[in-house]
């Protein structure tokens, strides 16, 4: 049987922290806190520490305790987690239809420039 934390899905706040760690690679709490400050100047070090400890407990982060300052890293690669979350979204919101997801995105969330780029990719023109 799988451990309970294997099925954990990150919250929006946890995804923000994961994005920082995917950019930094392994990092200490201090490094993550400093990287998040420009967007969240009100964010305290203690909050980042607590969140990273919770995420480690959920299996979302790994922790290297060999140094004095622990180094945390995402437990999953970005593309892997995105694929899992996308699969969940397609199942829950679009009755399992990837086409329905793409059509909704194209109608409501894609700029004309992005549509033109998608059209070029679909036609094999990768300028």
Image (cartoon, grey):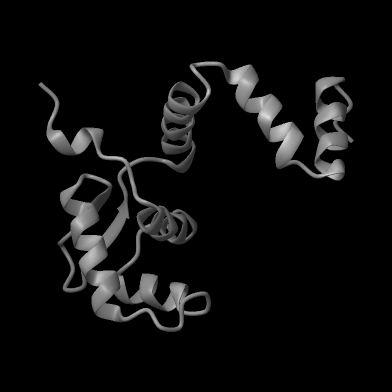
Q: Quadrant of residue 98?
A: top right
- Residue at horizontal 29%, vertical 79%? 45
Say if 108 sits above or below 102 in the image. Answer: below
Report whether 111 appears left or right of 58: right
Most foreground residue, 116 or 127: 116
Say which residue appears at 52% left-offset and 74% top-offset: 39
Quarter of the image containing the C terminus?
top right
Rendering quarter of residue 5: top left
Task: Give left or right: position of 56 versus 21.
Answer: left
The x, y position of residue 42, in whole percent, is 40, 83
Name which residue lies at 29% across and 71% down.
48
Q: Is residue 60 above or below residue 52?
A: above
Q: Relative to 33, say whether 83 is above or below.
A: above
Q: Residue at x 25, y 62 (%)?
A: 52
In the picture, the quarter occupied by the N terminus is: top left
Q: Position of residue 51 (x, y in %)?
A: 25, 63
The number of discs equals 0
| Residue 102 position in % (x across, y down) | 66, 26
Placement of 72 over or under 40, stated as above or below:
above
Percent position of residue 77, x then y: 41, 41
Res 44 → quadrant: bottom left
Along the line of sight, which residue is nearer the eye, 118 or 98? 98
């Amino acid at each position: 049987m799988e451990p309970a934390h294997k099925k954990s899905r990150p919250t929006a706040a946890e995804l923000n922290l994961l994005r920082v760690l995917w950019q930094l690679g392994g990092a200490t709490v201090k490094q993550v806190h400093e990287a998040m400050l420009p967007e969240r100047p009100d964010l305290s070090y203690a909050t980042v520490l607590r969140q990273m400890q919770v995420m480690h407990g959920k299996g979302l982060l790994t922790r290297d305790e060999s140094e004095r300052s622990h180094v945390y890293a995402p437990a999953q690669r970005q593309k892997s987690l995105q694929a899992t979350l996308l699969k969940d979204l397609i199942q829950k919101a679009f009755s399992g239809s990837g086409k329905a997801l793409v059509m909704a995105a194209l109608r409501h969330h894609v700029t004309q420039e992005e549509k033109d780029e998608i059209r070029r990719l679909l036609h094999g023109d990768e300028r």
